Image (cartoon, rainbow, N blue to C red):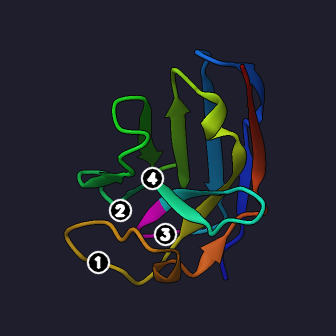
Amino acid sequence: QVQLVESGGGLVQAGGSLRLSCAASGRTFSMGWFRQVPGKEREVVATLTWSGGSTFYADSVKGRFTISRDNAKNTVYLQMNNLAPEDTAVYYCAADQHYTGKNPPARPGSFEYWGQGTQVTVSS
């Protein structure tokens, strides 16, 4: 069983930046960030493989968000730049201990562990 603890959410003005962190209690393979707003399904933001050499980004965040990881710390990061009001959501960290594919998964069902979520609010 892996515990995931997120941090770094908050309130920021449009155009600003935030950095989310997610610390895992054990070793993980693929990791990623998803987000959800009330009344909508959870959607992928960005994911990456164990090595970090292969990443996936949702079209809506490409060029603005960067996912990275530090395996020595069992931590994944999400650097979010040029934030927009439509980025407002609860952001969830996700991790898996079995997937070893070349490309990182992008569906919520591909991840077995989830954090508690951190709120990101972008004001206009």
Q: To which residue does mark 2 refer?
A: 50
Looking at the image, which residue is at 66% across and 31% down? 85
Eye-nearest disc, 4 or 2: 2
Q: To which residue does mark 4 refer?
A: 71
Instruction: Report how far apart the C-alphas of labels 3 and 2 lie in the structure.
Output: 7 Å
Q: To which residue does mark 1 refer?
A: 100
The percent coordinates of residue 12 (x first, y second) are 74, 21
As helix, strand or loop, the secondary structure at mark 1 comes to: loop
Q: Mark 2 or mark 4, which is nearer the start of the sequence? A: 2
Q: Are marks 3 and 2 in contact (CB under 8 Å)?
A: yes
Q: To which residue does mark 3 refer?
A: 28
Can you say whether 16 is above or below 51 in the image?
A: above
Crowdedness near tag 2: few (<14), some (14–19) or many (≥20) residues, C-alpha within 10 Å? many
Please count the marks in the image.
4
Q: Mark 3 or mark 1, which is nearer the start of the sequence? A: 3
As helix, strand or loop, the secondary structure at mark 2 comes to: loop
Q: Amino acid at mark 4?
A: Asn
Quarter occupied by the C terminus: top right
Eye-nearest disc, 1 or 4: 1
Q: Is 86 on the left-hand or right-hand side of 70?
A: right
Q: Are marks 4 and 2 in contact (CB under 8 Å)?
A: yes
Q: Is residue 115 magenta?
A: no
Instruction: Report how far apart the C-alphas of labels 1 and 3 lie in the structure.
Output: 10 Å
Looking at the image, which residue is at 57% across and 82% down? 112
Q: Mark 4 or mark 1, which is nearer the start of the sequence? A: 4
Q: Amino acid at mark 3?
A: Thr
Q: Which residues are magenta?
A: 27-31
Instruction: Report how far apart the C-alphas of labels 2 and 1 lie in the structure.
Output: 8 Å
Q: In which image quadrant can residue 115 be found?
A: bottom right
The foreground one among 124 and 110 is 124
